[in-house]
Amino acid sequence: MDTGDRLLTPGEVAALFRVDPKTVTRWAAAGRIGSIRTPGGHRRFRESEVRALLEGEGMLDESEDVANRPRNAGPAPAGGPGPANAGLY
Amino acid sequence: MDTGDRLLTPGEVAALFRVDPKTVTRWAAAGRIGSIRTPGGHRRFRESEVRALLEGEGMLDESEDVANRPRNAGPAPAGGPGPANAGLY
DNA sequence: GACGATTGGGGTAATTGGGGTC
DNA sequence: TCTGTCCCAATTACCCCAATCG
C-alpha cells in the first residue's frame, strides 16, 4: 500500500512529536527511528515510520517484547518501516 | 480534518489542571486520559482531549456517572476525539 | 559565490518516569 | 480512593558554534 514514503526533516518530526529537533536527532542516533542521511550528514525520516510511531496503535502485540527488552542491549535495527520502538524505559 | 491535535507536555497539562505532573502521569497510567509516548518514553497529551476534560462543564449530567464509575471495571474510554491510546506502558 | 534558515555535535540544566511512602 | 511528595535514573530542552541545505 502506499505508505507515502515522503521524507521529513528533523524539524518536521520534532513538530509532530512536540519535541526539540535535537531530540529527534538523538532518536536516530540511538536507532529508535530509521534515518536516511544526506551526503552532507543531515538526516531525513520516513513519514510512514514517523506516523507509525505517533499512532503507536498497531504494535500492541509487542508490548511484552518491549517489556523483556534490555534498554542498552538494543541492536538498533531501524532498518525499515518497522516498529523501531525499542528500549522503552 | 483539523482535530487540533496539538500535543501538550505533562507539565502543561498539570498547569492547566492545577495539579502535579505526577498526577497527570497517574491519569495516563490509569487510562483516564489518552497519551502518546515519545520513543524515549515521555508522554504527550492531545490538547483537544485535555480541553474537553477541562471544559467538561457542559455535561454536568456526568456528576452521577462519576459517582457510579466502577474503578476497576470501567474501561475508561476517556471519551476523546481521536484514538485514545489508553494506558500502555 | 553568497545568503538565510536548518541541522549537527557537545555540554549543561530542567523535566519526566517509575517506585515507594505518607 | 485520590493527591502530593520523596528517592534516583533516563530523557528532553536550551546554550554555544560550524557545516549543510535550499
Image (spheres, coloured by chain):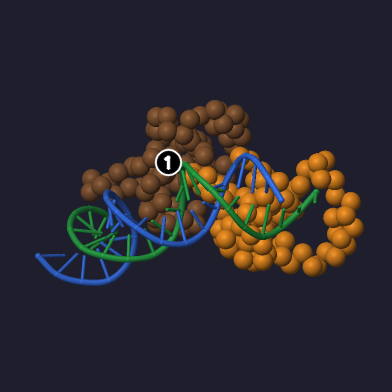
Chain colours: A brown, B orange, C blue, D green
- Element under label 1? loop
Q: Residue at x 52, y 45 (%)?
A: B41
- Indicate the chain on which mark 1 is placed: A
Residue B1 visible somewhere in the drawing:
no
Above or below, D14 against A33 in this view is below
Front residue of A79/B38: it is B38
Residue A5 horizontal/vertical position (percent): 43, 43
Q: Residue at x 82, y 41 (%)?
A: B73
Q: Residue at x 40, y 33 (%)?
A: A76
Amino acid on which the number 1 mark rests in the picture: Ile
Residue A52 visible somewhere in the drawing:
yes
Residue B62 horizontal/vertical position (percent): 85, 59
Q: Residues within 10 Å of mark 1 (few under 14, many from 20)?
A: many
Above or below, B32 against D15 in this view is above
Residue labelled with disc 1: A33
Q: Quadrant of residue B64?
A: bottom right
User: Relative to residue A4, is residue B12 drawn left or right?
Assistant: right
Residue B80 horizontal/vertical position (percent): 71, 54
User: Relative to residue A87, is residue B88 drawn left or right?
Assistant: right
User: Relative to residue B73, is residue A32 drawn left or right?
Assistant: left
User: Relative to residue A20, is residue A69 drawn left or right?
Assistant: right
Residue A87 horizontal/vertical position (percent): 48, 36
